[in-house]
Image (cartoon, rainbow, N blue to C red):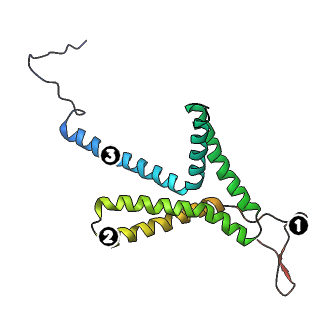
Amino acid sequence: MERAVVVEGATLATFVTGTITILIIGVLLNIVGLGIFCWALFALATHALPFFVGMTVGFYSFQAGVGPFGAIVVGFATAGFTFVIGRYAFSVARSPIVRLVIGLLFAGPAAHAGCSVTLALAHFGIPSEWWRESFAVLGAIAVGGIAWANVSMQTAPALRPGAALSLIQQPNGGTTTVG
């Protein structure tokens, strides 16, 4: 059995309490926190329409007297329902114009949110107004494009009733097989 000897007035120095170690841990935790913050902003911006609909219905239900927990549940359910219905409507629509309108309903608010967030973040480090606006436009394009991709991801137009997948038809009437 080992005995520890304590000298009066001595401080116990470990690797974890060293100044450099604490600074490194602080910097790493700041980077992780900033990454999570940016991810959350990007996720909310790309889902701007479902978020807005969920918040609106959640606030309305809270004012109607459902309580805070019920309003949160109703808001989350409505936001999820909005996103699922939007993707479903995009997938069953065969008309390119209808698909364009549904895509723009999701991409428009997301592009606006992306522009606003990018412009607000650009104010921290970019002194030139022109460069801030340029980055805001790039942020709007990126976030709007990601929102469009989220709605249209893996949703080809549905087949007409009675239509089946078949061999690829050539313009001259011949057929080829895929594979």
Residue at 67% of width from left, 67% of height from top? 101
Locate residue 174, reporting x and y percent: 86, 83
Locate residue 68, reporting x and y percent: 55, 32
> Which numbered disc covers residue 30?
3
Q: Quadrant of the N terminus?
A: top left
Q: Is residue 34 left or right of residue 74?
A: left
User: Mark 1 falls on what kind of element?
Assistant: loop
> Which numbered disc covers residue 163?
1
Residue at 40% of width from left, 50% of height from top? 35
Between the residue at mark 2 and the residue at mark 3, the CA separation in whole angstroms equals 28 Å
Locate residue 160, reporting x and y percent: 85, 66
Against 144, is 11 above or below?
above
Callout 1–callout 3 Cβ contact below 8 Å: no
Locate residue 94, reporting x and y percent: 77, 68
User: Mark 2 falls on what kind of element?
Assistant: helix
For disc 1, the neighbor class at 10 Å (few under 14, some 14 to 19, many from 20) is: few
Q: Is residue 17 left or right of residue 171?
A: left
> Which numbered disc covers residue 75?
none
Residue at 55% of width from left, 60% of height from top? 109
Against 46, is 172 above or below?
below
Residue at the spot of label 2? 129
Q: N-terminal of the two: label 2 or label 1?
A: 2
Q: Nearer the viewer, mark 2 or mark 3?
A: 2
Q: N-terminal of the two: label 2 or label 3?
A: 3
Give, as a three-letter code, the residue at label 2. Glu
Q: Quadrant of the C terminus?
A: bottom right
Against 82, is 171 above or below?
below
